[in-house]
Amino acid sequence: MRSPHQDAWRRWYSPSLAGVLLGGLLCALTFMPSLVPRPWIHQAILTGLAFFLGYGAGLLMSWLWRFMELPTFRARWRPAAFGILVTILCVHLAYHLWHAADWQNSTRQLMGMPPVEGVYYLRILLVAGAVAVSLMLLGAGLIWGIRVAAAFPRRYIRRRVASVVGVVVFLMLLVNVVNGTMVSYAITAVDQVQAAVDVSDPPGVLPPSRSTRSGSPDSLIAWDRLGLAGKRYVSEGPRAEDIASFTGQAAMEPIRAYVGLRSADDTEDRARLALKELQRTGAFSRELLVIATPTGTGWLQNEALAPLEFMYGGDTAIVGVQYSYLPSPHSLILEPGRAQQSAAIVFNEIYEYWKTLPISERPRLYLFGLSLGSLGSEASAPMYAYINQPIQGAVWAGPTFRNPMWSRIQANPEGDSPAWQPAFEDGSFIRVIGAQDGDDADHREWGPVRIAYIVNPSDAISFFDENMWFREPNWMRPPRGPDVSPLFEWVPVVSFFEVAMDMLTAGKAPPGHGHNYSARQYTRAWLAVTSPADWSEEDTERLLRFMPASEE
């Protein structure tokens, strides 16, 4: 009688043909284009994962077929049948590999990227094979452990009861080890690495000397308490002389306030400190005040905020409060609700003071958020802040697929507007600015509050759908966004993992594509939301040419 160990070893050397066929089918489909071009290592991981999932599904289907005692090929017909299936698989793989470069380059061409290298797919196949084998070994080890656990109690209790007890105990121990040790260790390691990064200084950056910046000698927040992202934020952006050089007129010194995670003990204290810093700098006497919710690491994109400072001659104040130093995906998973909670507390602290000021003297109040920051910012203002003494508007870029308001707009587009740039009601409250070079001139009247979403059609973080493993999302149906390849086809399960993998690299796409938003898009959004006086399209083009020189 063979032991469970011998059975597992025999199965390893006798792989499931159905598993190989289904795994090969799925991994070939992963070479088809997706929303953004994938680095070869991400493609390799996706291909290896697809083969593993397909192999597991094929193995399960074979087991169910035998368990239900359904008819199989007679012994003499099996070699011919298997030969035909293997031939079909090889043709299928060859077809997809032959066209893989063209499919990948179709997306790269839309984004102005160079074509892939010749060794691109050789590296993918080698690493994908290693990934698939590693996962299959882990799966085989798990099955072996379950078999051993199920067999051990049979010496003492009835067979079926023993099998159930053994499996349950084994799985409980496995989950406890994974959750209690491996996950805990991984979280601790990530936290330590990011904490060390957060206390470092950006290369070549010194503490600001001007009092309008946090971290300066006059600031309530010390430079070494700002965090890496905060130091970058207060050191970037135009100064008064840069703005004056652009406008040809005298300019004010823009206010950039920032409260780092280590600046105070808790969120409430950081919010109060942010308000005091704004009061210290005279922010409430400026024309515009922006409450900007950072991404998970605390980052505020300079290209998103600098255009506003140029438009208004520096008569602006922008404040951000850090709530985490983890990258946004890690913060979303490990610190659920942290962005929303922090943004709400910060908004309430500043808004309650702002609305006590005379309407004719207080600044116009706006919100801003990018990615996870948009999720926090979107949830920060309560309903009464849009009705009674309302804020003036918001710019939210790259909203996540978890953003409640964005999800509702996307699910219920007005009229025949495309899913990648949905219209919301009559456009007086919310408008969506899409592709970088798209024509979104909208001459309809705005209401008292103006909200602009900036969303690239190729942004997987905005358009990922948790149900797309079995249902084609609307944004994949024609007409598609201008930077989404027409060769991208929805395939059950495969497309789900493709777009999920795209989320990891969406921020690496060229500006104006994926999850990388450009100064041009932000400029258009702020123009739509704030309507600066005497600003023309020529001013926008001149600003976009001027900004790189002023920000170096």
Image (cartoon, rainbow, N blue to C red):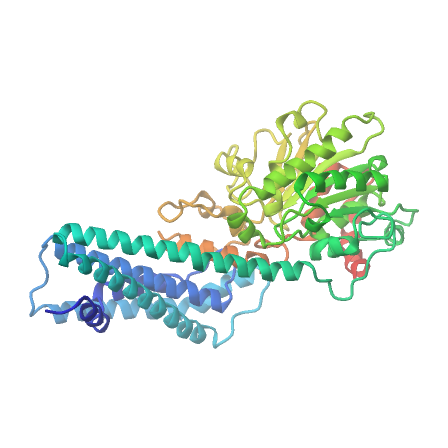
Q: Quadrant of the N terminus?
A: bottom left
In depth, the one of 336 and 507 nearer the eye is 336
Q: Residue at x 32, y 52 (%)?
A: 172
Residue 40 x %, y % = 48, 69
Can residue 189 be seen in this snapshot?
yes
Q: Residue at x 60, y 29 (%)?
A: 426
Q: Furthest residue to the right?
A: 250
- Measuring from the top left, give residue 521's x and y in whole percent: 67, 48
Locate residue 57, reporting x and y percent.
27, 57
| Residue 509 visible, this angle | no
Residue 43, compared with residue 338, is above or below; it is below
Seen from the viewer's position, the closer of residues 256 and 76 is 256
> Residue at 36% across / 53% down in the picture?
493
User: How far across and down, in percent of the image, does residue 33 sit?
Assistant: 45, 60
Residue 499 appears left or right of 54? right
Toward which corner of the image does residue 29 lie, by quadrant? bottom left
| Direction top: furthest residue | 388
511 left or right of 156?
Answer: right
